Amino acid sequence: MPEYVIEREVPGAGDLSDAQWREIAQKSVAILKGMGPQIRWLHSYVTGDKVYCVYFAPDETTIQEHAKRAGLPANRVSAVRRLLDPTSAK
C-alpha cells in the first residue's frame, strides 16, 4: 500500500499539552477504525507550528477524507517515493 507524508499547519502545535494531543489522537484513531483497514497511521512528528504524519493509504483522496472527518488540516499530502537511512550510504 502506498505511504504518504501529510503536512498539517497547526499554529502552536509544539505547545499543546499531552492531554490535548491524546484527545486529538483518540479522535483520529476512532475515525480510522470507522474507515476500515485501508488507511493506517504510523506516527507523527510535531514541530513548532506543523505536524508531519506518516500514513499508509490507497490514495490521496482517502487521506483527505480522514482529515476532513477528523477536523484536521492536510495542507500538503506527498506520496513517499523512497526511504533513505544511514544504510543507504553503503
Image: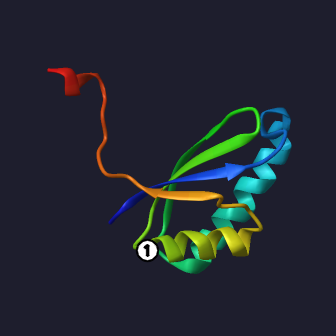
| Residue 6 in the image: above or below residue 18 | below
Q: Position of residue 4 (x, y in %)?
A: 45, 57
Question: Residue under circle 1?
Answer: 38
Q: Quadrant of residue 26?
A: bottom right
Is residue 25 or residue 89 the one in the foreground? Answer: 89
- Amino acid on which disc 1 is placed: Gln
Q: Position of residue 77 (x, y in %)?
A: 53, 59
Q: Position of residue 58 (x, y in %)?
A: 40, 73
Would residue 66 be found to the left or right of residue 82 on screen? right
Q: Position of residue 56 (x, y in %)?
A: 43, 61
Crowding at dot 1, Cα within 10 Å, few <14 / some 14-19 / many 20+, comes out as few
| Residue 14 in the image: above or below residue 51 | above
Residue that appears at 31% across and 51% down: 81
Would residue 20 be found to the left or right of residue 55 on screen? right
Would residue 80 be found to the left or right of residue 7 on screen? left
Is residue 25 or residue 16 the one in the foreground? Answer: 16
Residue that appears at 85% across and 37% down: 17
Q: Secondary structure at mark 1?
A: loop
Residue that appears at 48% across and 70% down: 60
Q: How is the image coloured?
A: rainbow
Q: Quadrant of residue 6?
A: bottom right
Residue that appears at 67% across and 52% down: 8
| Residue 49 in the image: above or below residue 81 | above
